[in-house]
Amino acid sequence: MSKKEVTILSWHSTKSTVQYAGGFRRLYEILQRAPANINVTCIDTKPSFLRTINKENIKLVEYKIPDLIEQITKLNFLVGKFFERAYVVMFFTQYLLTHKKTTVYVPFSELPQLTIPAIVSKLFVRNKVIFCNLNPNTFFVDKVINKITHKLSDLNITISNQLKLQLLRTGINCSYVNPVGINFKQYFLNIPKYKNITGIFIGRHVKEKGIYTALEVCALLNKKMNFSLICIGDIPLNEKDKIESELTKLNIKSKVRLLGITSEEEKINYLSSSHVCIFPSTQEGWGIVPQESIMCHTPVVAFNLPVYKENIAKCLAVTLVPESDIDEFLKSISDWLTMDKDQISKKLSQSIKIIKKFDWSIIAKKEWELICQL
């Protein structure tokens, strides 16, 4: 019996090592668990975050964004990104039209540069197309394109019931929900006996992920106590100067360390060494950071987003405050910093039991079943 052929279309910024980020981590973990009876060709930007996967049935193809486009991006970010998208669309379209028939899986179908070539291949070579959408689109053109492409796909997946409702309001119907998991094996290895970092923020350094709120919180807390903040995550080129300017304006340059992207091991060590995780994101399809923080024995303060009802709302080690309520956010952080250690430990133990059901083995098995059912 011949093996099923699956082609995965991927893209990531060439300026960051993105294996740490939620969506990319999801793809990485699912690929790690690809069944032996499937031949997978994964096509990703060079250098790929998937290089460390070593499985006989997985072939990695890397493509490079031309240097000229990267130079244009440095001069004008928006113009450069337009040309980069156009290049990615042309590359994938040519690849899919000149290779044998396959099932096309797009793990980040919020990206039009991936959905367009997938649908073109369906129309011209009759490939089956499966999308997994991780975020609602914010730009009008992206919304229009993806509304069309998702209607033409064979199957749409998303990662939470809340996101499913959000996408439905934009005209995208996802038939299946399969969340984000946790790799439990990498935790509990280096939990420090003491914590030497006050607060930590993890996430892409953009407004909707809460970086500017985290900086504001740090500044306000420093009026009452000595509060230091470590920030981990991708810093887009168009945000770097804004963040530096904000640090200067708030007079907290000496209190904040911007580490950018770190390795997974470094991230876990920093999380484990922190007293509290600050996660003021206002846009989450699932929200993996609070779960990772709990596994690192670090309590979390976050805004009460609807999606958390599906994963962390019942976790005692997570304080959820009304969105944009900075005063309550500050109070919750202070409460964790002054709470008895035994009480914190009990809350963390209860929370770990809750999130253990989100095991990557379960998530990956379901994803491959969905991919292979066509």
Image: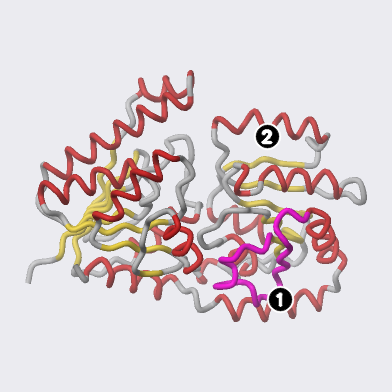
User: Seen in the image, is 145 located left or right of residue 103?
Assistant: right
- SS at mark 2? helix
308 drawn magenta: yes
Q: Earlier in the sequence, mark 1 or mark 2?
A: 2
Q: Which residue is mark 2?
A: 243
- Mark 1 to mark 2 CA distance (whole Å): 32 Å
Q: Is residue 128 magenta?
A: no
SS class, disc 1: loop
Numbered label tally? 2
Q: In the picture provided, is 196 more to the left or to the right than 126?
A: right
Q: As rendered, which of 165 and 95 lies closer to the eye?
A: 165
The residue closer to the viewer here, 321 or 335, is 321
Residue indicated by mark 1: 316
User: Left or right: where does residue 275 sit relative to residue 362?
Assistant: right
Q: Amino acid at mark 1?
A: Leu
Between 184 and 316, the residue placed more toward the observer is 316
Residues in magenta?
303-325
Amino acid of disc 2:
Ile
Farthest residue, direction right? 224
Tell me if 97 is positioned left or right of 238 in this view: left
Point 40% across, 71% down: residue: 363
Instruction: Please provide percent x and percent y for residue 17.
Output: 47, 43
Q: In the orientation shown, which residue stands out farthest toward the left?
A: 1
Label 2: few (<14), some or many (≥20) within 10 Å? some
Mark seen at residue 206: none
Q: Residue at 48% of width from left, 18% of height from top?
A: 75
Q: Quadrant of the N terminus?
A: bottom left
From what the image shows, is residue 145 above or below residue 350? above
Residue 244 in the image: above or below residue 350: above
Q: Position of residue 100 (x, y in %)?
A: 9, 50
Question: Which x, y percent locates residue 339?
Answer: 85, 70
Q: Is residue 20 above or below residue 194?
A: above
